[in-house]
Image (spheres, rainbow, N blue to C red):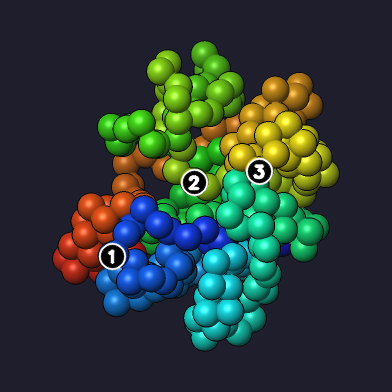
Amino acid sequence: MQNLTAIIMAAGFGSRLGEHSQGLPKAIVEVGGRPLIWYAINLAKRIGANRIVFVGGWQYDKVRSVVLSIDSGIEVYENKHFEWGNLYTLEEALKHVDESFLLMHVDHVFSISLAEVIRRQLDERIVVFTDNDRKLGEDDMKVKTDASGTKLLEASKQLEDFSLGYVGLTYCHSSFLAAYKQAVQEAKQAYGEKAVTEKAMLALAKSVNSAVSIGDISGYGWLEIDVPEELMAAQKELSFNESKYI
């Protein structure tokens, strides 16, 4: 596999965790005795990332300190517009990326056995990773594929006709990097402060030359920590199955 940069986005408030966040940014909320960012860094290394770019925002200095205490070699940048859509966090990251990258979110904890499953699907494509394991709610990102099930057609939380659920991982091969960066700028211009990363992904999917492929991690399971119930479920899961995630 060629050089790979892992982009970990963690600029937001994490306000949906309420008092369970103890006033901390989500990236450094502890689950299983470790800050959430630890799990993302661990998975990125196991997948084979030779470089990790982290973008923080709210309480940036505090988050930066924790990230560098885990690995002083991680490149840490600040999104000064963290209160806007997460596309601005991605835009900041992409200023520092000139090779293939894997986009990750700090509030997703994946089984370490998925590292090889993901790595096998990183080739000369743009790949949106999905699964069919979950019952998707109104706040989950849904994905509609073409008839073959291999190409992305639509992605939205509001989709009623969908095929799969998005798991928050997107890979872009270096040959599509320029097109991806252009799509980010187009989405930013079209949606302003509400721009989110999925808008850029869809712009690419609608381009004949930049068809977005579907990756699959079904059957492995993963943890999302966005609301208090999910945080408590993740704490319970890690207390019984810690070795699955570390």
- Asked where in the image residue 238 lies, by quadrant, the reply is bottom left
Against 88, is 137 above or below? above
Say which of marks 2 and 1 sits in front.
1
Amino acid of disc 1:
His
Amino acid of disc 2:
Gly
Image coordinates of residue 195 in percent, x first then y, are 64, 40
* Image quarter of the C terminus: bottom left
**Label 2, on which residue?**
168
* Relative to 31, 178 lies left or right: right
- Mark 2, secondary structure of its residue: strand
> What residue do we see at 78% from left, 41% from top?
185
Against 4, is 166 above or below? above
> What residue do we see at 40% from left, 18% from top?
160
Amino acid of disc 3:
Glu
Image coordinates of residue 131 in percent, x first then y, are 40, 36
Label 1: how many Cα within 10 Å (few below 14, some 14–19, many 20+):
some
Q: CA distance from mark 3 to mark 2?
A: 20 Å
Does any portion of residue 214 appear in the rendered image?
A: yes
Label 3: how many Cα within 10 Å (few below 14, some 14–19, many 20+):
some
* Relative to 125, 225 lies left or right: left
Badge 2 or badge 1: first in the primary sequence = 1
Badge 1 or badge 3: first in the primary sequence = 1
* Relative to 108, 1 lies left or right: right
**Label 3, on which residue?**
193
- Mark 3, secondary structure of its residue: helix
Disc sitting over residue 20 in the figure: 1
> What residue do we see at 72% from left, 35% from top?
187
